[in-house]
Amino acid sequence: MELKKSYPLLETTDPWICIASKLSLSIRVVNAIYRKYLQPHNVTMSQLSLLMVIGKHKFLPQSEIGKMLKLERSTVTRDLKRMVAEGYFIKKGHKSRPVIYITDKGARYVESIIPDWKLATQEAKNKLGKEGEQALNLVLQLLMS
């Protein structure tokens, strides 16, 4: 059914000026690159972020993880639950303030992923070029300040 009325705001608005849309589209393009390389490892980017960040620190309070990675609490909780069940992490401490520790199994797992993660990172860097990567760094710096 065709429109029977005029919608001037819709007709005169350019959706491509939307910052959120541009960033979301960028994320989808980059995520597709990473999914291609990470698919054999059965890991998502948010799960890999947890593995890498907790692995680098050896342990972190669960409350700090979401803050560090700018992930929603529900995402952190869901991903940690799966990864604790897989034996990659263990939770210690009080139930209301758990501390998450990476296990040797988790460290071995992330070590097996890193070569493919590096390939994905290189492909994304190649697509962006030096100027694009610098622009991305600037965008992040501006948004995080």
Image (spheres, rainbow, N blue to C red):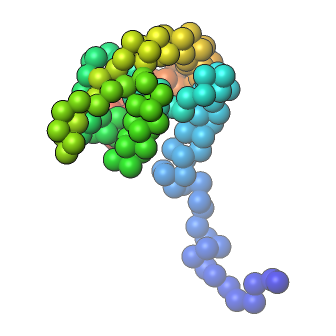
**Residue displayed at 41% across by 39% down:** 81
Q: Quadrant of residue 12?
A: bottom right
Outermost residue, right direction? 1
Count the marks: how many?
0
Q: Nearer the viewer, residue 118 or 65?
A: 65
Q: Which quadrant would the N terminus be assigned to in this image? A: bottom right
Q: Nearer the viewer, residue 18 or 73?
A: 73
**Residue displayed at 34% across by 20% down:** 102
Q: Which quadrant would the C terminus be assigned to in this image? A: top left
- In the image, residue 129 sits, relative to residue 108, either above or below, namely below
Q: Nearer the viewer, residue 6 or 113?
A: 113
Instruction: Left or right? Give the position of 41 relative to 58.
Output: right
Outermost residue, bottom direction? 4
**Residue displayed at 54% across by 11% down:** 112
- In the image, residue 19 sits, relative to residue 58, either above or below, namely below
Q: Position of residue 135 (x, y in %)?
A: 46, 29
Q: Quadrant of residue 49?
A: top left
Q: Quadrant of residue 104?
A: top left
Instruction: Left or right? Give the position of 69 relative to 28.
Output: left
Q: Position of residue 64 (x, y in %)?
A: 24, 35
Whether residue 105 is visible here, answered yes or no, is: yes
Instruction: Left or right? Give the position of 128 relative to 58.
Output: right
**Residue displayed at 47% across by 11% down:** 108
- In the image, residue 75 sits, relative to residue 87, either above or below, namely below
Whether residue 139 is visible here, answered yes or no, is: no
Q: Position of residue 36 (x, y in %)?
A: 68, 26
